[in-house]
């Protein structure tokens, strides 16, 4: 029998689900956020990048090391003596120090600090992206848990009814077509549950990865947790917040500042550095035990860094255009996210007015009347399917309200909802 196979498949799914659920992590939104910040590998890796950039700032502050040179006689052809380095021999010592001019060292430090600031902003952006994924998946799991439980109860009820119907059909008290119609409703509901179960475990994988756990996550939330996402905010105010808070914009503003600084740095490279040195020559100079001092400097006659300066100027213009493009992109995404959020809030408010305990009471009454033969099979199955569509739509609207509000937070760059 086909429906018996479906029952067996359902039992396997349920038993497998329960087997995994033995190791369950029950969390609220606050606890999930705490685990996320403490355990997420992505955040830990990004935090290491900040430390890398801070170390590069330290390195930029360090001054070039001096250079010490020692030169000794290898062979004295007059006296036929190798390594003649005594009082009558020859040895030279020299000490050199590079002096950086033109403000280049200061620019290098400033650019290193800017890169460190960008790394911090990229960390904030990563937090923003991952929190969106976490909250979205958590509330999806919460609604799926509710829906899966309802489907399981309904399938158990239909299984009981089917068993009774098979007996009556076998006795000839009921037509076979009614049994087939009831089996069709059972299989449709079972298919819906199987598809939902796949989505549920996909979301579980996302949450488990973000929270660094192998336990099945059971999300606990209330209707108040959902209604907290409903806030009256004007679009223009949100645009102002986004322009001042969106990490992508802040990063690109830093990129533009960094490009301007790099352009100035390339101009500073035209100024040659000075290499100061002092040397001691035992016998090779004009005098015995001669001490010398001097300096060397490149003469910027042909190479004045013209190509790099020009390239850096174009990079600065490119960063400016990229910033303006990103501003437009952020505002456009925000506007569309706000439109979806407003529509979803309206849907949710209609849902609250329409869906109440009458649905559950009516389902119970229809089931009892069907078992008492007070209503026909067609009426029962039609109501059953309509009820399931209603509860699935309820879960969709609630999930989408949270998702659209979190998407708005993502578009703004800070938690407003």
Image (spheres, rainbow, N blue to C red):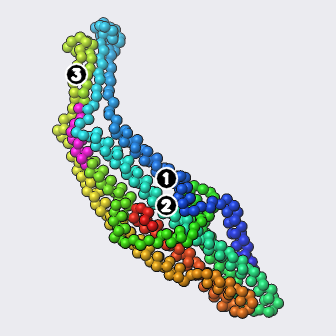
Q: Which mark is residue 131?
A: 2
Residue at x-position 65% and y-position 83%: 361
State the extent of the magenta-drawn residues as a range.
Answer: 263-274
Using the image, tell me which numbered label, if any, was put on residue 43: 1
Q: Residue at x 52, y 76 (%)?
A: 397
Relative placement, left or right, of 381 versus 68 is right
On the question of residue 59 being in view, the answer is: yes
Q: Nearer the viewer, mark 1 or mark 3?
A: 1
Find the distance from the CA under tag 1 to the CA under tag 2: 11 Å
Do the residues bearing badges 1 and 3 touch, measured as CB atoms within 8 Å?
no
Counting from the top left corner in percent of width and height, residue 165 is at 76, 86
Q: Compared with residue 342, is residue 51 higher up or lower down, i.e. above or below?
A: above
Mark 1, Cα crowd under 10 Å, few <14 / some 14-19 / many 20+, is some
**Residue at figure coordinates x 39%, y 64% from the top left:** 412
Residue that mark 3 sits on: 293
Does the magenta portion include 266?
yes
| Crowd around label 3: few <14 · some 14–19 · many ≥20 (10 Å) | few
Magenta stretch holds residue 31:
no
Tell which tag, 3 or 2, sits nearer the viewer: 2
């Amino acid at each position: 029998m086909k429906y018996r196979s479906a029952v067996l498949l359902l039992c396997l799914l349920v038993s497998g689900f329960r087997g995994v659920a033995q190791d369950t992590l029950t969390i609220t939104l606050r606890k999930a956020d705490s685990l996320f910040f403490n355990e997420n590998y992505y955040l830990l890796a990004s935090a290491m990048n900040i430390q890398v950039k801070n170390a590069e700032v330290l390195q930029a502050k360090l001054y070039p090391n001096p250079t010490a040179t020692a030169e000794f006689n290898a062979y004295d052809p007059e006296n036929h003596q190798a390594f003649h380095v005594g009082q009558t021999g020859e040895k030279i010592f020299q000490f050199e120090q590079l002096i950086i001019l033109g403000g280049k060292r200061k620019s290098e430090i400033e650019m290193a600090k800017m890169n460190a600031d960008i790394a911090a902003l990229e960390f904030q952006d990563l937090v923003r992206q991952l929190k969106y994924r976490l909250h979205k998946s958590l509330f999806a799991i919460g609604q799926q848990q509710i829906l899966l439980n309802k489907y399981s109860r309904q399938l158990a009820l239909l299984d009981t009814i089917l068993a009774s119907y098979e007996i009556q059909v076998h006795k000839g008290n009921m037509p076979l077509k009614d049994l087939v119609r009831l089996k069709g409703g059972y299989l449709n509901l079972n298919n819906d549950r199987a598809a939902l179960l796949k989505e549920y475990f996909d979301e579980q994988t996302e949450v488990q990865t973000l929270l660094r756990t192998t336990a099945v996550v059971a999300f606990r939330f209330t209707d108040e947790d959902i209604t907290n996402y409903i806030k009256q905010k004007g679009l223009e105010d949100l645009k102002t917040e986004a322009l001042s808070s969106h990490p992508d914009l802040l990063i690109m503003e830093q990129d533009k500042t960094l490009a301007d600084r790099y352009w100035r740095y390339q101009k500073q490279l035209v100024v040659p550095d000075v290499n100061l040195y002092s040397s001691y020559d035992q016998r090779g100079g004009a005098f015995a035990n001669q001490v010398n001092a001097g300096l060397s400097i490149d003469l910027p006659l042909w190479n004045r860094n013209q190509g790099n300066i020009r390239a850096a100027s174009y990079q600065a213009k490119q960063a400016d255009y990229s910033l303006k493009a990103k501003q437009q992109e952020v505002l456009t995404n925000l506007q569309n996210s706000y439109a979806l959020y407003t529509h979803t809030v309206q849907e949710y408010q209609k849902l609250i007015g329409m869906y109440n305990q009458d649905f559950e009471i009516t389902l119970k009454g229809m089931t009892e009347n069907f078992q008492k033969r007070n209503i026909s099979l067609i009426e029962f199955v039609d109501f059953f399917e309509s009820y399931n569509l209603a509860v699935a739509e309820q879960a969709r609207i609630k999930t989408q309200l949270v998702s659209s509000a979190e998407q708005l937070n993502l578009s703004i760059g800070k938690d407003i909802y």
